Image (tube, rainbow, N blue to C red):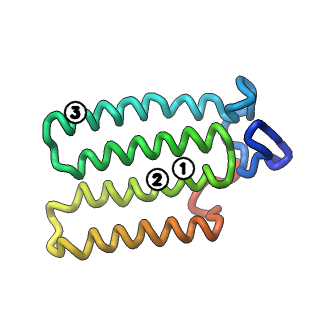
């Protein structure tokens, strides 16, 4: 099991995913899962620069920042395979989904203050619950 593997970051506290751990570097557990986030980070940065330059609504800039946070969280998690970084990968996924819901449906909301409040509270509650309870059913834990 993955818990028996030790690394620069300490013992692996999350499950092994798609590739063998620490094959290419003693600092990066899943090399290809880690570096595959670099294009996501670059494209999100380019999107942010273009959104700011073209003066898009702020919600689109927030979306690009969210994409960068998600890519960084995923990089940290797949590089270390630590439980704390796993939450830093999975919680931004849920936040990003909520942000997409906000961006897609906000022009059509009849209750403009209710839905953003609900989405924010849902995201905050999920983050707290995820920190306290290890969710295994919602995210792929084992192959």
Q: Is residue 138 above or below residue 17?
A: below
- Mark 3 nearby-residue class (10 Å; few <14, some 14–19, many ≥20): few
**Mark linked to residue 50:** 3
Q: Earlier in the sequence, mark 3 or mark 1?
A: 3
In-image side of 50 versus 43 (left or right): left
Circle 2 Cα neighbour tier, 10 Å, few/some/many (<14 / 14–19 / ≥20): some
x, y percentage for residue 81? 68, 44
Residue at mark 3 to residue at mark 1: CA–CA distance? 26 Å
Q: Quadrant of residue 109?
A: bottom left
Q: Are the residues tagged 2 and 1 within 8 Å (C-beta)? A: yes
Q: Element type at marker 3?
A: helix
Q: Is residue 45 above or below residue 63?
A: above
* Count of labels in the image: 3
User: What whole-number distance in Å separates the C-alpha atoms at marks 2 and 1?
Assistant: 7 Å
Query: Callout 1: 10 Å neighbours few (<14), some, many (20+)?
Result: many
Disc with the residue nearer the chain's start (3 vs 2): 3
Q: Which disc is residue 93 wearing?
A: 2
Residue that carries the numbered disc 1 in the rendered image:
89
Q: Residue at x 17, y 34 (%)?
A: 53
């Amino acid at each position: 099991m993955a818990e028996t593997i030790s690394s620069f970051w300490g013992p692996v506290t999350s499950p092994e995913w798609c590739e063998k751990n620490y094959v290419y570097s003693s600092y990066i557990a899943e090399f290809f899962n880690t570096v595959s986030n670099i294009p996501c980070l670059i494209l999100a940065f380019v999107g942010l620069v273009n959104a700011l330059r073209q003066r898009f609504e702020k919600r689109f800039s927030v979306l690009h920042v969210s994409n960068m946070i998600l890519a960084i969280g995923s990089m940290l998690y797949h590089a270390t395979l630590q439980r704390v970084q796993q939450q830093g990968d999975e919680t931004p996924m849920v936040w990003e989904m909520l942000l997409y819901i906000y961006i897609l449906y906000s022009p059509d909301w009849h209750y403009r203050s209710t839905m953003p409040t609900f989405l924010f509270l849902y995201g905050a509650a999920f983050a707290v619950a995820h920190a306290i309870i290890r969710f295994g059913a919602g995210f792929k834990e084992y192959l």
